[in-house]
Amino acid sequence: MKFSFSDEQEEFRVFLRRFLEDKSPTTEVRRLMETDEGYDEAVWKQLSTDLGLPAVHVPEEYGGQGFSFGELGIVLEEMGRALLCAPYFSSAVLATIAILNAGTEEQKRTLLPPLAAGEKRAALAFTEPNGRWDNSGVELTATASDGGYRLDGTKSYVLDGHTADMIVVLARQPGTSGDHGLSLFTVSSDADGLSRALLKTMDPTRKQARLEFQSVQADLLGEEGGAAAPMALTLDQAAICLANEMVGGAERLRESALDYSMMRVQFGRAIGSFQTMKHKFADMLIEVELAKAAAYYAAAAAAEEDEDLPALASLAKAGASEAYMQTAIKTVQTHGGIGFTWDNDTHLWFKRAKSSEVFLGDPSHHREQLMQRWDV
Amino acid sequence: MSETTEDTVRAEARAWLEANWNPDLSLLEWRNRLVESGWGAPTWPTDWYGKGYPDALGRIVEEEFERIGAVSVARTGIRNLAAATILAHGSDLHKEKFLRRILTGEDTWCQLFSEPGSGSDLAGATTRADKKGNKWIVNGQKVWTTSAHHAQYGLLLARTDWDLPKHKGLSYFILNIEQPGVEVVPLRQMNGHASFNQVFFTDAEIEPEFQVSELGDGWNVATTTLMHERRGADGLRRYQQATDRPGRCYEEEAEEIAHQLEPYKWYPQRAGRTDLIIERAKATGMNTDPAVRQEIAKLMIMAKSAEWTARRARAAQAQGRPQGPEGSIGKLTASNVAKQAAHVHTMISGADAMLTGEDSPMDGVISEILVSFPATSIAGGTDEIQRNIISERVLKMPKEPRTDTKGPFRDVPRNVVS
């Protein structure tokens, strides 16, 4: 499992790839990235209703299909390859996993089925304008009032936060710090005191929002003050998911660069016949293959609830980030002047590589995490 | 393969070993029994000391050897390549004369391919074999020859026709090393060890029957040898392990292994010794330096990912699926890991990285890493050749244009070797 996919998983991948090639050609990516919502309602319905993709990793008792991170990794790799514009990572990965990890049995039975069916979309609001990726960056406060809670503060870099129906929010009890006093809450997107603003993102294929909370009424998700551990697990699992998405994009770029090098003629020969290009492509292959091996291994480890999961998440995320970005840079370079134009598709993936490199922590952050998690 | 076949073979191998294995036999006596029974080389043909089993059944037999702890036939060094080449291309005379003594370990072999003027470009060999009377007379020089200092025979690639194109004018011979026309001189490497040899030929003689295959078929035969060499050099090579168990057979085997492997005791260091990094960083306190931590993490990510990539290749093979690109990149990733490991060891060692021998950390092991890792990017196919192979065979990019393969070899530019 850590080193190979089953025949069923391979078939699933082929099926998904065909679907996504059909639904997410670059003409569609370019159309959707210019919109504020950033996705196509009809395609979202199809991938939810016909394919059940938001339900893949959700247990059957919560309306899901009961598969695991192995299958989820395949979905994300193929979405990354096709650069699908959809609120999948925000809702099906971040918010769904947070609810699975933190929610009470009853909350999971209530909240998850509509998310798994794709009828509702949720976003996970955890980072703040300080841009920190760990729990200690949380400043937004939750104050008990009238048997409920009121949230005050600002969340930022919230994927699809402007379109989600429900926001899962990480907040802290006033006066606490670090991992202490953290709780998760759910907030309806039309709650009083919540204002949402779309951020101008360099990667227009993945939308982000800034959310202001002014005495917003919220429902506790899971245990009060006990969000640190489920949140850390959620971020590790999400990092593994993102790593799988990234290697899908990296491989697509590598292939497009290779195709172009065989087609483009200069000095009377295909530029791919020059040894300097051949050696560059050998190195690109190695970078992407190593990142794939780590992303697959980590996904399988997540499925098996491996105790080394935190370290593996950081390893896979750092590896995939470097491989994707380096491949993107080399793909622009292979295309030469045309690669720097807006009309050429390379920049679409280049920008996703950049936003994914930073989102959930950049490679330096994860390398340091890896060292800490291995107790070096 | 059916379960029944596997079970039958396993039962037969087990029964034979239980009836015959005796650690108090001499190594030679035991190996002669293996040779006569066919259990020593079960994948070899039944006519030549084997049982004609496919590789999968061979592994079953191996497992039974391991289970009972029986000593195997001789396997170290070039003798495996010699055997594979002789089985594929040799005459009955060659098989009769050499195969048995290869298995018993009585003869040691070396490979006379690389030359000072042809490293990556082996087909550019200029060592010549000329027919004089009824004999082949050899003149020239080979280099990087493993085991030549204690070998009885060498696999020789030599040019027999200078008017034919490069690859057509080569022939393949079995050369007796122990003769006056052959001089073996150790070659000292930059790390101070002398693990290889230079071999000089001055009118060395070969009897005509020790030509392998047809005249001019040398490159084809050499390709067989090289294919087996690569197969053994994929990073998963199993060195014969000595044990300290009592019994004459074990003791003689341990002696054989120690003798064979002594020149290569620095090999672990050339791979970078990633296994030492974390304990060394903690011991020196450099584990608290943020810059060092970043470099350690980069190394570990690369090394772990490379290990998992190799395991993906093996898993695909085991499932009978076509091998993906992950199978072809091991050699180059090993070079990348070795380079980064040497870089990190330098950071960790600080000023001590300038010292060597007993003045340097770990009684010289660290300094040996720092002066041995470049070998990984050269031996067994340079990084540059690996990149050509990956781009041409895996990525199907165009082959390098060649100007050296058509027309008489004598007109092809080549190195001047003094």
Image (cartoon, grey):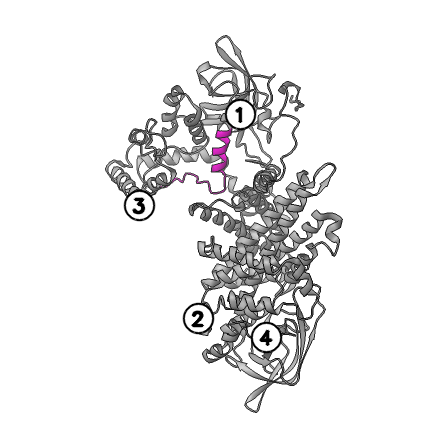
Nearer mark to the viewer, of 1 and 4? 1
Residue type pointed to by label 4: Gly
The span from disc 2 to disc 4 (Cα, nearest Å) is 35 Å
Residue type pointed to by label 2: Glu
- Mark positioned earlier in the residue sequence (2 or 4): 2
Nearer mark to the viewer, of 2 and 4? 2
**Residue that appears at 60% across and 54% down:** B298
Q: Secondary structure at mark 1?
A: helix
Residue type pointed to by label 1: Trp
Q: Which mark is residue B219?
A: 1
The span from disc 1 to disc 3 (Cα, nearest Å) is 40 Å
The quadrant in which the N terminus of chain A is found is bottom left
- The residue that disc 2 covers is A60
Residue type pointed to by label 3: Glu
Residue B232 in the magenta stretch? The answer is: yes
**Residue that appears at 43% across and 33% down:** B259
Q: Secondary structure at mark 3?
A: helix
- The residue that disc 4 covers is A178
